[in-house]
Image: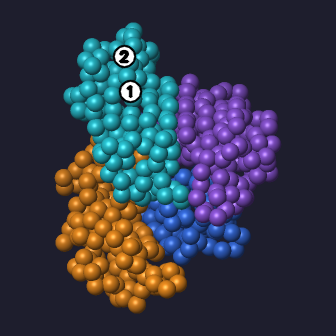
Chain colours: A purple, B orange, C blue, D cyan
Amino acid sequence: MTYSFSVVPRYAEIDQQGVVFNGHYLTWFDEAFTGFLDHVGLPYPELIASGVDVMVVHSELDYGGSVRWRDDARVEVTCERRGTTSFTLGFAVYRSADEVAVVGRNVYVVVVRDPETGAWSKAPGIPEKLAAALG
Amino acid sequence: MTYSFSVVPRYAEIDQQGVVFNGHYLTWFDEAFTGFLDHVGLPYPELIASGVDVMVVHSELDYGGSVRWRDDARVEVTCERRGTTSFTLGFAVYRSADEVAVVGRNVYVVVVRDPETGAWSKAPGIPEKLAAALG
Amino acid sequence: MTYSFSVVPRYAEIDQQGVVFNGHYLTWFDEAFTGFLDHVGLPYPELIASGVDVMVVHSELDYGGSVRWRDDARVEVTCERRGTTSFTLGFAVYRSADEVAVVGRNVYVVVVRDPETGAWSKAPGIPEKLAAALG
Amino acid sequence: MTYSFSVVPRYAEIDQQGVVFNGHYLTWFDEAFTGFLDHVGLPYPELIASGVDVMVVHSELDYGGSVRWRDDARVEVTCERRGTTSFTLGFAVYRSADEVAVVGRNVYVVVVRDPETGAWSKAPGIPEKLAAALG
């Protein structure tokens, strides 16, 4: 499954070379991830309320092109890998219908909250509902 | 008393017209305020730990000029007004030794934490130590 | 005429007190202004291409409340004043259907490009098309 | 050679979990790179003025820990690789004197400006002065 998240590049995100400053793509990935969770019926606040959270432990980005102001951009999200306690989402930033500017991925580790102490720790596995959402 | 806070304009803060995007000045004001509290011997975390906090209720900015990348910028902070439960700090953003680009001010309301309930509410007055710091 | 611009508060915009950091509202105002120009049929790039631009010379904000992550937020834009060479837009940030969190305004000065030299200077007046758009 | 760049984490960079939002580290890397160039006597504006620029084509980050507000942070920069037309800088974000929170790297491709057409293209090699600066 690929989920597509629309982005309107903000004027404040464009640097003096006329392109989106590279740090902002990680913000877009984060928003796209939140949108992805909504899309699969597992809104992030509900996930957290159920005692499950995810932590990004690794990011990578390849900048093959640039997104500019007024581009009709989107971020496509796919689950690249689902391990036992972590998963990897791939992100492809399109600057137009068919032109990819940037690709990247985040590795997420699943953590769970101890219902008694409230402390978070690495999950023994990916909770079923999240695993199903990841496909 | 005027406190001077140095700022290195970040490349990511410069927009495609080659100047600092206007929203970032409020971030600079905020950092300058934190620096001001350090300078007067009342670090922000200590203030909060003592059960006192401030909330910005009003901001205004006049953009008379622009700050550019590599400008040797600073924000000068002065207390413009000290009322009974609020105060106003003035901020002047210099883009060089003697050239002011932007001026502005924030109005802060002082809030205190009820030691029993932990709830925050408007302070009956500005705590002595903060009042002294404001001059 | 009031134009309404939807905003999804970004997780990266939320500070450790759980509310949108105040500097981001100016970014929202800016995006809402761009949306407003689209809405009135005068997209910003077309405006600039026609030799007309606007410069924000003054901003002010009153923070009566807070916007939080996952709020269904919007910015309502109204023209508060149309002078001979400048105009004022008012912005009201709603954190829900009927709850205003922040209000503010930007004063814009209209500048025009000399077709021969390419230099920008204060416009003699607000160009008709923009004036009509402002209502 | 390792160059150390001090960073004061901005309040606006801290998210509601109390840690620096991950996208900001790329901004820190960028500022650290600019500081690095200053340090080696090759300020970025001079580099560009000489017809040489660099483009980030790849970034990666491993988040082993978190930086918090008021941490005395720094970014250590080292040249990890110097190829014929590209180079890799490694960045280690310390949240205290000896505790690394995040490590990452950027791959930069060198581009040069054609003095006649003004167009930028991939450099045939890393210009001597920059190569020397990279060590």
Quadrant of image for the C terminus of chain B: bottom left
What is the three-letter code of the residue carrying label 1?
Leu
What is the three-letter code of the residue carrying label 2?
Arg
Q: Nearer the viewer, residue C126 or D52?
A: D52
Residue A73: name its quadrant.
top right
Residue at the location (67% across, 62% down)?
A115
- On the image, the x and y values in percent for residue A33 come to 67, 45
Asked if residue C4 is positioned above or below residue B57 in the image, the reply reads above
Asked if residue D124 is positioned above or below residue A69 in the image, the reply reads above
Q: Are marks 2 and 1 in contact (CB under 8 Å)?
A: no
Describe the element under mark 1 as helix, strand or loop. Answer: strand
Q: Distance between the residues labelled 2 and 1?
A: 9 Å
Quadrant of image for the N terminus of chain B: bottom left
Asked if residue B78 shows in the view, the reply is: yes
Quickly name the residue at label 1.
D89
Residue at the location (64% across, 68% down)?
C95
Asked if residue C100 is positioned above or below residue C11 in the image, the reply reads below
- On the image, the x and y values in percent for residue C111 come to 44, 51
| Chain ID, mark 1 | D
Quickly name the residue at label 2.
D82
Whether residue D120 sits left or right of residue D135 in the image: it is right
* Disc 1: CA contacts within 10 A as few (<14), some (14-19) or many (>=20): many
Describe the element under mark 2 as helix, strand or loop. Answer: strand
- On the image, the x and y values in percent for residue C23 come to 47, 60
Q: Which of C37 and D30 is in front in this view?
A: D30
